[in-house]
Amino acid sequence: MRRRSCRGNATGLNALHWAVDRGHLDVVNLLIRHGAPLETRNNFGGTVLGMATWSAMQNLRPQHPAIIEALLAVGARVADADHPAGHPRIDALLDRHRNAAL
């Protein structure tokens, strides 16, 4: 029996989830421009924005704040983000968008 990989399709992560996790802002922007869905949920229940905040909490990469800003700017639902994220800049971004939605 072949063992299933914990990467790729076995996780339910799409290309946008992976780009967000790895902190690749240029790829995130490219995928957004081409209509990648923001609200697709992975096998763990997280959307792309949820993945961005989770990734930032686990292993903050320099582009994570800009990625979160880009996702929020194109309509990612702030309610799907892990909050507080434990990073002042990210928490301020989420608070600003959460308050604007009220």
Image (cartoon, rainbow, N blue to C red):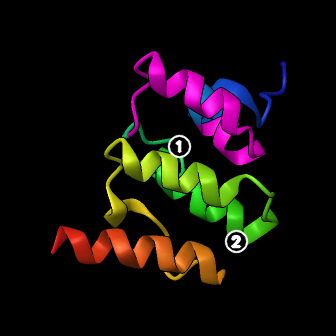
- The quarter holding residue 41 reads top left
Q: Is residue 93 above or below residue 61?
A: below
Q: In this view, does 76 lie to the left or right of 44?
A: left
- Mark 2 or 1: the one toward you: 2
Q: How many labels does the image show?
A: 2
The disc placed on residue 43 is 1
Q: Mark 2 points at which residue?
A: 57
Q: Position of residue 95 (x, y in %)?
A: 39, 79
Query: Which image quadrant: the N terminus?
Result: top right
The foreground one among 12 and 38 is 38
Task: Name which quarter of the figure residue 22 lies in.
Answer: top right
Between 72 and 51, the one nearer to me in the picture: 72
Q: At which x and y percent is residue 82?
A: 50, 70
Q: Can residue 14 be seen in this view?
A: no
Q: Position of residue 36 (x, y in %)?
A: 45, 24
Judged by its main secondary structure, the magenta piece is helix
Label 2: state its secondary structure. Answer: helix
- 33 displayed left or right of 75: right
Q: Residue at x 46, y 52 (%)?
A: 45
Residue 67 is tagged as: none
The answer to whether the residues at label 2 and label 1 have Cβ atoms under 8 Å apart is no
Callout 1 secondary element: loop
Looking at the picture, which amino acid does disc 2 mark?
Met
Query: Badge 2 local density, few (<14 within 10 Å), some, or many (20+)?
Result: some
Q: Which residue is located at x 80 percent, y 57 percent? A: 62
The residue carrying pointer 1 sits among few (fewer than 14), some (14 to 19) or many (20 or more) residues within 10 Å by Cα, namely few
Q: What stretch is highlighted in magenta?
A: 17-38
2 or 1: tag closer to the N-terminus = 1
28 to 9, vertically: above or below: below
The kind of residue tagged 1 is Asn
The answer to whether 65 is drawn above or below residue 67 in the figure is below
